[in-house]
Amino acid sequence: MRRDLRLDNVGRRYGIRGPWILRGVHLAVAPGTLTRVEGPNGTGKSTLLRLLAGLDAPTEGRITGRPRTAYVPERFPSALPFTPHGYLTHLGTIHGLSRRTATRAAGEWLDRFGAGAYARTPMAQLSKGSSQKVAVAQALLAEPELLVLDEAWTGLDAAARTELERAVAERTAAGGAVVFVDHDPSRLAGAPDITYRVRDGALERRTCETDAPAGGPQVVVEVQGPQGGRPPVDALGALVSAEEAAPGTYRLTVPASHSDVVLRTVLTARPPWHVVSVHPLDSRPDKDSRR
Ligand SMILES: Nc1ncnc2c1ncn2[C@@H]1O[C@H](COP(=O)(O)OP(=O)(O)OP(=O)(O)O)[C@@H](O)[C@H]1O
């Protein structure tokens, strides 16, 4: 994934007079990040994930920077006229793999999720949990730049749940982004770079204290720009805080995992912003040692 997937002022409602499920949503999903979306039932989490996955279009607003995406839905249509192996091989070739490579990858992913024993059983005969393993394998097979998981752990056995967590870590380590919803608050606890809560049609970014039990290292980036201007990172969703130290000078506190993205955004902004200093939180150099 090379750039952020961005939602600008996105709204979605079903039907011309239906209530707005989401409205005024600004969101940036950065490469290499893990994002959790939470909120009570029926608030629009799946709606947001379908928009992110490109399976649904916003009623208003814009979505830009769409990467190669794979999606695991809450309910996988398992009554497909395929065996798991045949289905994955077919999808692999659609994603551009040679037949041989797709066949091998299909076998490997099914084995990873403990589904090798029924790789050649018609999918219509599989249990819900077994179908879910196929759903997860089909998403991972293509090594997507963005992986969108809507309650993807539901129905998986313990080994497959762990395997999916491992696959999520692999995707972000490879520079991909993962966005997930899961009813279990302990799912990937401490791992998300950002957590959003859907409330009243809007997205609230959970504060650092509540969404990062592990804390995670943070970095302070001091930037200078035109007086009266706002640093160009508001929509990133990566900021922990932005404090105006002097007119036109801001101290941005960001998770260390996002510092590259924030620096890139600041340095490529128009009009340009100047990076004064970058240092870990709580080890701020005194003024004389700053560049
Ligand atoms: N295709 C659709 N047509 C009409 N209404 C829909 C459609 N999809 C979702 N909705 C409505 O939009 C609202 C949000 O649904 P959504 O599935 O996005 O919420 P959710 O937070 O994912 O819920 P849950 O946690 O129960 O899965 C609900 O009121 C739902 O009935």
Image: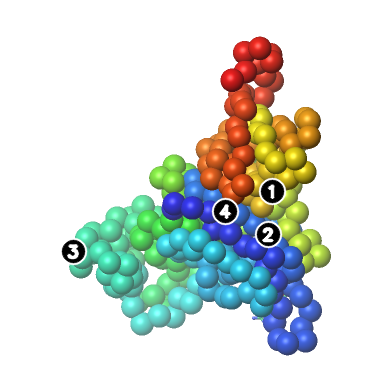
- Asked if the residue at tag 2 contacts the one at tag 1, i.e. Cβ–Cβ closer than 8 Å, the answer is yes
> Badge 3 local density, few (<14 within 10 Å), some, or many (20+)?
few
Residue hosting label 2: 26
Label 4: element kind: strand
- Asked if the residue at tag 2 contacts the one at tag 3, i.e. Cβ–Cβ closer than 8 Å, the answer is no
Which dot marks residue 234?
A: 1
Gap between marks 1 and 2 measured at Cα: 9 Å
Which dot marks residue 100?
A: 3
Gap between marks 3 and 2 measured at Cα: 42 Å
Q: Residue at the spot x=40%, y=80% of the render? A: 80
The residue at label 2 has a CB less than 8 Å from ligand 1: no
The residue at label 4 has a CB less than 8 Å from ligand 1: no
Label 2: element kind: strand
Residue 211 coordinates in the image, percent (x, y): 70, 42
170 versus 11 height, above or below: above
71 versus 286 height, above or below: below
Residue hosting label 4: 29
Decide which of tag 1 and tag 2 comes sooner along the chain.
2
Residue 283 coordinates in the image, percent (x, y): 66, 18
Label 1: element kind: helix
Decide which of tag 3 and tag 1 comes sooner along the chain.
3
Amino acid carrying label 3: it is Arg
Left of 110 or right of it: where is 235?
Answer: right
